[in-house]
Image: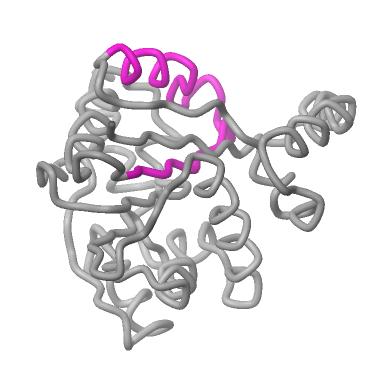
Amino acid sequence: MNAFSKIAHAKEHLGYKSGNIYSHTIDKDNAKNFVNGYQKILNFYKFHLPAQNKCIDLGCGAGHLTNEFKNHGFDITGLEYSNDALDVAKKHNPHLNIVQGDMSKFNEPNSYDFIFSREVYIITRVNAFTDQKNIISNIVHSLKPRGGVFMLVGSDVSYPDCMNYDLIRKVIKNQGDILVSQKYYEFIFRKFNKFIFGKISYKILEILLYPLIAYKSRKGWAKIYIILFKKK
């Protein structure tokens, strides 16, 4: 199966039906905790959300994270691929602006202060790096200059059939006008958020928790990473 077929297969079978969309989204009760953690990482990189801002959540699922970002002052739109997925988002968060679109074709240069995407199948379940590189490059170039941020949250749930996160960091960083963060573990922000005050406290927690991470990984635990791409 070539790269294009892999992407098409992922769209059709793995992530764009209503049941799958909802099973891979964050529930309403936990959304606030997740976004509080994401906000701390944004603070690490001195992200300042303008009062008049434009943001989008690519692959928003049921829209609970989208809604929580909105509660934090983000003027955010949710994007989903299929009619079924759109119906799920509108059912759970009818007040949000949810639009239909294809993340793999997303390209709106210099338009967004903040772009977010969490656990989209064409990133986490498909090994098609050239296509994924083009997708991420287009998203990054859709950021506004001098401070726009793309937050990518993705797992290695189907490793090696997922995006190569280390390689995508290197490739995008080599473009020159993009600051690329390290890979952060989402679960540390979820479980130990109140102990994180900056990069140093996060790093201490990561070192202390590494034996647990290694043990859980050997047992088949899928690591979920957070990576920031900031336009200089």
Q: Quadrant of the N terminus?
A: top left
The quadrant in which residue 110 appears is top left
- Side of 138 relative to 162 (left or right): left
Q: Quadrant of the C terminus?
A: top left
Question: In the picture shown, does residue 55 fall above or below 127?
Answer: below
The percent position of residue 83, horizontal first and vertical second, equals: 22, 69
Question: In the picture shown, does residue 111 fall above or below 128?
Answer: below
The percent position of residue 30, horizontal first and vertical second, equals: 65, 70
The residue shown at (81%, 24%) is 218
The percent position of residue 231, horizontal first and vertical second, equals: 28, 34
- Side of 24 relative to 57 (left or right): right
- Of 125 and 78, which appears nearest the observer? 78
The residue shown at (57%, 31%) is 156
- Of 102 and 15, which appears nearest the observer? 102
- Tell me where the magenta segment starts and ends, as one range: 149-174
- Side of 222 relative to 203 (left or right): left
- Of 137 and 173, which appears nearest the observer? 173
The quadrant in which residue 85 appears is bottom left
The residue shown at (23%, 47%) is 103
The residue shown at (44%, 37%) is 228
The image shows a total of numbered marks equal to 0
Question: In the picture shown, does residue 97 fall above or below 174?
Answer: below
- Side of 159 relative to 168 (left or right): right
